[in-house]
Every structure is written in structure tokens, then in C-alpha cells.
Image (tube, rainbow, N blue to C red):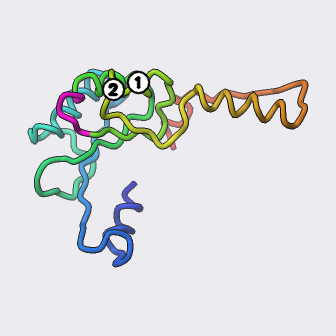
Amino acid sequence: MLFAIEEINNSTDLLPGIELGYKIYDACGSIARAVRVALSLINGNEETATTFEKPCSGSVPAIMGETSSSPCMAINTVIGPFHTPMVSHFATCACLSNKVKYPSFLRTIPSDYYQSRALAQMVKHFGWTWDGSTRTKAEDYRDY
């Protein structure tokens, strides 16, 4: 994310006349902490555990993250009335597509519903009769 922000800020073509700022917090796998940090970002109170910061002027127009669906559901339940968008790159629960319950949630990855339909279409298209799959737990990536 830092690389993308710097590329945007250093480019005269991508967002001319706009400089992006950021505050990055680590929720440490805690849903309660994720909600507290999201509220801190919205109301301007400083959370003490800032990891990286390039100060912004004004309020936070959007929150990027969390990676899993449960924290996103909790955060969006709390920040929904403030109409602050939250964008997740990895929350896939189809329930988050409910715009009545989670009006400010956006994602950059298809929900589980669409991923499973796409996989079923691939299996049908290629005539596969057998499928092997693997799973890696999120905890396996903590050291990377």
C-alpha cells in the first residue's frame, strides 16, 4: 500500500493536484481493536499504536482493510452511520454484499458466492471430474 500511495503521489498523471496521506494501524488480530481503531480514524482521536503515518489534513475519507470478513462486519456495523467507506482486499463473505446492513462496505475481491460459481463453471467448462484443493491458514503468513 505504501508503494502504491507513493507512486500516486509522485505521478503527475494518476491523480493530478491530489496528495494522499495515510495512517496504518495493526489490529493484531483483535476484532475489538479493529473497531476501536476504525472509530479513532473516523473521529480524529489519535490511537497510540501508529505503525506508519503520513499525516492527512481533514477527516479520513475511507478505511482500507481488514483482511477477513468478521472484523469487516464488526467495523461496518459501527461505522455504517458515519457513511465512511471501508474497502477490503480479502473479505469474501457474501453477507457483506448486503447494502442495507453494510452500506459503506466495498471490496476488491469477489465474494465467496461468485468465487464458488466461477470455480463450478471452470469445472464444467473443462469437463473435470476430479478436483484437488489446498488451504493455507492466515497464521502461516504472519512472519512474511
Q: What residue is drawn where x is 25% and y is 53%?
A: 22
Say few, some or many: other residues with alpha carbon within 10 Å of mark 1 (under 14 / 14 to 19 / 20 or more): few
Number of numbered labels in the structure image: 2
Given residues 106 and 100, the one toward you in this image is 100
Horizontal side of 88 relative to 120 (left or right) equals left
Q: Main secondary structure of the magenta part?
A: helix
- 11 or 117, which is in the foreground? 117
Q: CA distance from mark 2 to mark 1?
A: 6 Å
Q: Position of residue 48 (x, y in %)?
A: 15, 39
Say if 90 sits above or below 131 in the image.
below
Residue at label 2?
A: 102
Q: Are marks 2 and 1 in contact (CB under 8 Å)?
A: yes
Asked if residue 46 is among those painted magenta in the image, a careful observer would answer no
The residue that label 1 is drawn on is: 98
Q: Which residues are magenta?
A: 79-84
| Image location of residue 28, percent across then percent down | 34, 30
144 left or right, relative to 25: right
Q: Quadrant of residue 77?
A: top left
For mark 1, give the secondary structure: loop
Q: Amino acid at mark 1?
A: Asn
Q: In the image, what residue occupies the spot 55% across and 36% down?
A: 110
Left or right for 130, reference 79: right
Res. 20 image quadrant: bottom left
Q: Residue at x 72, y 28 (%)?
A: 134
Q: Residues within 10 Å of mark 2 (few under 14, many from 20)?
A: many
Q: Is residue 141 above or below residue 56?
A: above
